[in-house]
Image: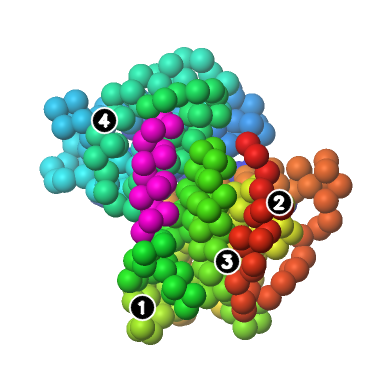
Amino acid sequence: MHPISRRHLERLTGELGIMQHAIGSRPDPKHGYCVDDVARALEVDLLHGRVLGWPAVADSAWRSVHFLQAAFDESTGTFRNFRSIAGEWLPGRPSEDSQGRAMLALGTAIATTTDDDVRAAATALWDLALPGAERLTALRAQASVILGCAAILDLGPNEPARTLMARFARGLDRRFRSNASSDWFWPEHELTYENALLGRALIVAGRRLPSKDMIGTGIQSIDWLLRVQTSASGHLSPIGNTWWARGGVRSRFDQQPIEATALLLAAEAALEATGAPRFRSAMELAYAWFLGRNDLDLPVAHPARGAGSDGLTASGPNTNEGAESTLMWLVAAEHIRAQRAADLVAGSPQATPTRSWGQPAPVPAQLQLSVVAR
């Protein structure tokens, strides 16, 4: 396990928030900021605050909260996405994914911050943005909102959050059931990016509603993603960023850090739901991808600086170290740190491969016995 390093995170941070892109390790101000990355940066600060203490991250977290406050457009009920380095909001329709990520970050802040003022600010903004979130139709945006609602429900009953979580989760579950098959267990006709986010959302929602069927769908989707993205030699080989259409040729490169981290977080949710050791191993599989257990045996993360390369290309790691990639490394590292600490306390065995991903696991039968209520 590597010590936390915020060196590159701080280097990428401008006056208003974390900048989107970098040329090499140098920030590239001409591309400015975006809500997606600022929301993720807030989540990283919340994770780091648990280890380093809140004073170490408070200024950074507040910078992100203020950015999200400024991003919200009351005339449309949505978050503007792109902002120039000078602070001007750029024209154009914001993506649904940016809305979902903002809601996830706010929900996480409300549920986990130790700063009452941050919680109050995040709660006020969540309440303003909730009606706009209800209109989202993109599956990944809905999945992010599901997770944000679930985080808020960790604090206690909240009927608007529970209602929206249930509506989105049931719709996502129906999409899987109507489109997935044993050879393509997916609700879309193409695998694209951050795929495991969908299964993670189903598991988390299924535990809170509760719905064993929903959890089962989520577990099966994660098992399938692991099966099709694990190499013959046993390392993670995420889909490349020209994607994989059903019946077509799978893209191998450029592999993106967001896919590895999404799988790690989904495996964590599956482990919490089932206790199945294979998901502890899957978390380590995804973490190892960053450190060089991948198709090229080359590290994609640079722990001493807290930086992440912008993907794994056919010729090696991308030399640029932008916000998304760096934040995905930092998220992955903190979730592994927490899982290993929990395993030590519980006396769990070290994570080792426990099964081949060549065949899906008998999920429904397992769930009847091992779902842990939350």
- Where residue 277 sits: x, y (%)? 74, 59
Numbered circles on residues, count? 4
Which stretch is magenta? Answer: 161-175
For residue 131, which numbered disc appears in the image?
Answer: 4
- Where residue 151 sits: x, y (%)? 51, 33
The answer to whether residue 353 is above or below residue 58 is below
Q: Nearer the viewer, residue 65 or 245?
A: 245
- Please name the residue that numbered disc 1 is placed on: 246
Examine the rendering and report whether any part of residue 103 can be seen: no
The residues bearing labels 2 and 1 have C-alpha atoms spaced at a distance of 33 Å
Q: Residue at x 57, y 73 (%)?
A: 227
Examine the rendering and report whether any part of residue 61 can be seen: yes
The answer to whether residue 247 is above or below residue 114 is below
Mark 4 Cα-neighbour bin, 10 Å: few <14, some 14–19, many ≥20: some
Query: Of marks 2 and 3, which one's residue comes earlier in the chain?
Result: 3
The residues bearing labels 3 and 4 have C-alpha atoms spaced at a distance of 34 Å
- Where residue 166 sits: x, y (%)? 41, 40
The residues bearing labels 1 and 4 have C-alpha atoms spaced at a distance of 35 Å
Q: Is residue 190 left or right of residue 359?
A: left
The residues bearing labels 1 and 3 have C-alpha atoms spaced at a distance of 18 Å
The residues bearing labels 2 and 3 have C-alpha atoms spaced at a distance of 16 Å
Mark 2 Cα-neighbour bin, 10 Å: few <14, some 14–19, many ≥20: few
Prevalent SS, magenta region: helix
- Check disc 2 and give the amino acid type: Ser
Instruction: Please tell me whether mark 1 sits on a helix, a strand or a loop.
Output: loop
For residue 370, which numbered disc appears in the image?
Answer: 2
